[in-house]
Amino acid sequence: MNTPSTRPVAMVTGAASGIGKGCAIALAKSGFNLLINDMNQELLEKLAVELQSLGAECQVFHSDISDLALHKPMLDRAISRWGRIDCLLNNAGVPAKRRGDLLEATPESFDRCIDVNTRAVFFLSQTVARQMLVQGEITGQHRSIINITSSNATMVSISRAEYCISKAASSMITRLLGVRLAAEGIGVYEIRPGFIETEMTRPVKAKYDELFSAGRVPIPRWGMPADVASTVTCMAEGRLIYTVGQAIAVDGGLAIPHY
């Protein structure tokens, strides 16, 4: 292993656009070097240039995060370059292949949601946590695993049942890992975004605009990737003191029952 970098290192999955991109930029500004992962090679390369302009060193790892065989090579890329890993942001996620009656949901759509949103989160977290335990805390830097789930980890959306199920399971991963790693000084956290303006939500923009207009969301505007990123940096920097498996709703109040 190389002599550890003096800068902390974060790994961000699904980093090429949307929430992942916003978080990668925020982490770079916060002083992290980054390994960024996504299936879109072109957008990853563009992001790498942007991160480097912010003073961060950057490694690009192009892969489908559901391919578990590539998890260790991805981590090894970061360790061989910087000698450490301090933050894993499990951001990569996929929606249901098609919204509709849950009685018509297909095994293919269900399996894809589970593979990316749940299975990959569990096993990549397992791989990174083992490395964090081996290396220990370096230069007083907080170690963290952060899972981006969804308001649908608890809120029912019957038109995309497989997505809700996968995110609810990912939420349990947060709590399980949080309890397992708490005594080791590794913080495990979860962010539940609400309606965030990204490419993924663009197809349903008109529907959600109506909910804002109707007062369904206490903060009556779309969330932005930067809103999520501000919470990610708080977690990565270790500012959620004395918390374990904490879930933060970054949703403008969407999930709060109200009338």
Image (tube, rainbow, N blue to C red):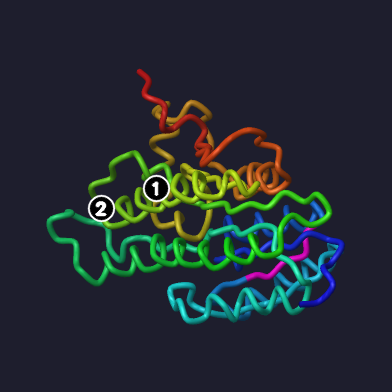
Could you tell me residue 185's position as x and y percent?
A: 65, 46
Mark 2 nearby-residue class (10 Å; few <14, some 14–19, many ≥20) = many
> Amino acid under label 1?
Met
Q: Quadrant of residue 32?
A: bottom right
Predominant SS along the magenta part? strand
Instruction: Give the foreground label among 2 and 1.
Output: 1
Q: Is residue 259 shown above or below 194?
A: above
Q: Which residues are magenta?
A: 32-36
Q: Is residue 97 left or right of residue 187?
A: left
Picture disc at residue 29: none
Q: Which amino acid type is marked by label 2?
A: Ala
**Relative image position of residue 159 (x, y in whole percent):** 24, 51
The image quadrant that residue 156 belongs to is top left
Quadrant into which the N terminus falls: bottom right
Name the residue beneath numbered marker 2.
Answer: 161
The residue identified by callout 1 is 172
**Residue at the left extreme?**
103
Circle 2 — which element? helix
Mark 2 → mark 1, Cα distance in angstroms: 17 Å
- Residue 43 in the image: x percent, y percent? 63, 74
Looking at the rendering, in which quadrant would you find the C terminus?
A: top left
